[in-house]
Amino acid sequence: MTEIITRDAEATVALGEALAAVVAPNDVVLLSGELGAGKTVLAKGIARGLGVSEEVTSPTFNILLVHEGRIALNHIDLYRLERVGELEDIDYRGTLESGGVSVVEWGDRFAEAVPENHLTVRIGILDDEVRFFELLPGGDRGRQLAGDWLERSRSLEGVEIGEDAS
Ligand SMILES: Nc1ncnc2c1ncn2[C@@H]1O[C@H](COP(=O)(O)OP(=O)(O)OP(=O)(O)O)[C@@H](O)[C@H]1O
Ligand SMILES: [Mg+2]
């Protein structure tokens, strides 16, 4: 198990940029963690790293916002959905496979909607400005992505990487 810690929001943005540097089309990143944990901040960093120039805001009310970048960013927020069937309204599965990178806030909300290959990032609040990120990869691609992201993040300022034996 590997955990990442960031000491401020800026470090979380840098962490997102590092993830953007290693993603490929159709990668799926699921973000979980309580309100205000930092899911949107991480998504902003990913957007920056993908070269998205427009402002990235929380897609809570739109559910899905697509941003043009080096690779398109599908920024999704499942917070307001009540039933898994509502995912069909945004063609969730089709969107995940449309060639972009999908970043899904509250992405663990419906277990049956989690694709085999994915990287879940569980974000927790440790202190005012301190957050931890637990990487929970699924499938070969998820594990590859987690490994590449960690490698890329080791030298970032304000980012600490800790590993335990579990
Ligand atoms: N280390 C940190 N990483 C990320 N955000 C931080 C950090 N320290 C403080 N913050 C602050 O925490 C807040 C995180 O808000 P954000 O909108 O990203 O949360 P969220 O997880 O997307 O919440 P929601 O479920 O409401 O969408 C921001 O105000 C940000 O400035
Ligand atoms: Mg958010």
Image (spheres, rainbow, N blue to C red):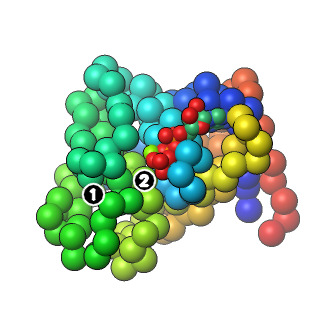
> Label 2 belongs to which residue?
105
Q: Secondary structure at mark 2?
A: strand
> Label 1 belongs to which residue?
96
Residue 134 position, x and y percent, is 66, 56
Cβ–Cβ below 8 Å for labels 2 and 1? no
Q: Mark 1 near ligand 2 (CB under 8 Å)?
A: no
Circle 1 Cα neighbour tier, 10 Å, few/some/many (<14 / 14–19 / ≥20): many
Going 62% across and 52% down the picture, which residue do you hit? 123
51 to 141, vertically: above or below? above
Going 23% across and 40% down the picture, which residue do you hit? 66
In front of the other: label 2 or label 1?
2
Residue 153 position, x and y percent, is 65, 35
Looking at this view, name the residue that lies furthest to the bottom. 112
Nearer the N terminus, badge 2 or badge 1?
1
Looking at the picture, which amino acid does disc 1 mark?
Answer: Leu
Query: For the N terminus, which image quadrant?
Result: bottom right
Q: Nearer the viewer, residue 78 or 73?
A: 78
- Can residue 73 be seen from the camera position used here? yes
Q: What whole-number distance in Å separates the C-alpha atoms at marks 2 and 1?
A: 13 Å
Residue 165 position, x and y percent, is 85, 65
Q: Nearer the viewer, residue 40 or 82?
A: 82
Going 33% across and 24% down the picture, which residue do you hit? 55
30 to 75, vertically: above or below? below
Looking at the picture, which amino acid does disc 2 mark?
Answer: Glu
Q: Secondary structure at mark 1?
A: helix
> Which quadrant of the figure shows ligand 2?
top left
Looking at this view, name the residue that lies furthest to the top. 53
Q: Mark 2 near ligand 2 (CB under 8 Å)?
A: yes
Circle 2 Cα neighbour tier, 10 Å, few/some/many (<14 / 14–19 / ≥20): many
The numbered disc on residue 26 is none
